[in-house]
Image (tube, coloured by chain):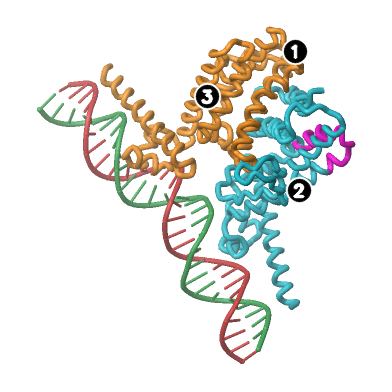
Chain colours: A cyan, B orange, C red, D green
Amino acid sequence: MSIADRKERERQEMRQGILQAAAHLFVTEGFPKTTIRAIASEIEYSPGTIYTYFKDKQEILNALFHQFFDELNIAIRTAGEAVESTNRLTAIGRAYIDFALQNPEHYELMFLMNHERLEKNLPDVSPEVDCFDAETGKKVESAQDDGSFQYMQEAIQLAIQSGRQPRYDLHTSTLLAWSLVHGIVALHIRGFLQMYPPDYLQIMIHHAVDGISSSIFLD
Amino acid sequence: MSIADRKERERQEMRQGILQAAAHLFVTEGFPKTTIRAIASEIEYSPGTIYTYFKDKQEILNALFHQFFDELNIAIRTAGEAVESTNRLTAIGRAYIDFALQNPEHYELMFLMNHERLEKNLPDVSPEVDCFDAETGKKVESAQDDGSFQYMQEAIQLAIQSGRQPRYDLHTSTLLAWSLVHGIVALHIRGFLQMYPPDYLQIMIHHAVDGISSSIFLD
DNA sequence: TCAGACATTAAACAATGTTCATTATGTTGG
DNA sequence: CCAACATAATGAACATTGTTTAATGTCTGA
């Protein structure tokens, strides 16, 4: 079965090549310029060939979507593990904002764009939601436990276990923390913070990172 | 000059008709279905006629953009003026979230979509930024003073003048408040909060509205 | 060797935003 | 009232999208 293996390998390499070209165009030229024809041209194939490896354009975006989330997760966890659990939430927030500001096109595809046909598995963000399930009444354990959001939730839980006084329940705290950092970078990327001088914006963002903790903890 | 007046009036009526048709399509069918041809069909004219009244599609979106911001501003100010200044910030936050959740397509166009060619005057959101100007060193008074963001900033200032202890300076406080509410609704509209049962999400959002104050005030 | 599976391509398709020559209509000056 | 002109509306056409397909080539497996 060696030939079939090679074929499959070549197929995956082609897929990766297409994804790489798409990601490159996406980052360097922006989304509108990332057309099927441009991707095909980048890898020096005809447009039709793309459809041998991906069902449609959305499937390419899906793949990039997951790929970018993996990058975010790595960045978040790396930053989180580098500090002790008491500072973890702040470190995560800082890493999240840095990721978004340094990879605005990634963040665009991940959180800002409207995907419609995206299969919203969100396999790498969702936290476990085991709070009261409305229908069955029993807790539902999510199979997912390696997402950034989940990790943020764990960091908050660790802080609580370390003695910090939470203002709200765990899920609400996590939502507030996530909303705060997402809100800042989303507004910034969309140009709604342009009226602030860059230096001052940096200071405000720095304060905001500290603000994550103070907004969800009493002490 | 009565005939010229009538012509100008008819022209504005046609513009309004086009905008109304576009807004209707936008809300009922969503953005992708809001094509020039669909708008033209809605008002029973040929597609080319649209270009007699608008330079291109982006100009139509610009007009809707401003129109929707006017609606948001009215909603915010109405909610704000209905309560005394101590509760104003919370009322504004609640109104902001309600507007976004009840008019997701509006919010989509206003804050979520990527406009690129949009002339970012943002004539109805921006606050005055009179903090230290990097170049000249002197404060720059913005001509703009009726935006929702500006109004939120004033509400925070009122709260401070009423004796509340701010955790950060005024601009940072305003940014945090706005980021928090925008973050929540942006994540929700993009489907990132789907794992929460709707009832529970409502409770969290309710907590979040209270959280605006507690995140920027010490007391 | 040969038949079938597969990859690649160019061409074509439909739908988009946009432009343009043509037609029609209404306005204005004499 | 008529002739010239400005303007608006139209349908056809254009370029650019994503996508499909028939044809061609290539490679694999028996």
Q: Amino acid at mark 1?
A: Gln
Q: Secondary structure at mark 3?
A: helix
Q: Amino acid at mark 3?
A: Leu
* Crowdedness near tag 1: few (<14), some (14–19) or many (≥20) residues, C-alpha within 10 Å: few
| Residue behind mark 2 | A145
* Residues at marks 2 and 1 on the same chain: no
Q: Which residues are magenta?
A: A78-96
Q: How many marks?
A: 3
Q: Is residue B170 above or below residue C27?
A: above
| Residue behind mark 1 | B165
The x, y position of residue B38, in whole percent, is 39, 43
The chain letter for the residue carrying disc 3 is B
Q: Tell me where residue A104 sits by quadrant.
A: top right
Q: Please indicate, yes or no, whether residue B172 appears anywhere in the rendered image.
A: no
Q: Is residue B192 above or below residue A63?
A: above
The chain letter for the residue carrying disc 2 is A
Which residue is at 70% across, 18% downward?
A: B171
| Residue behind mark 3 | B72
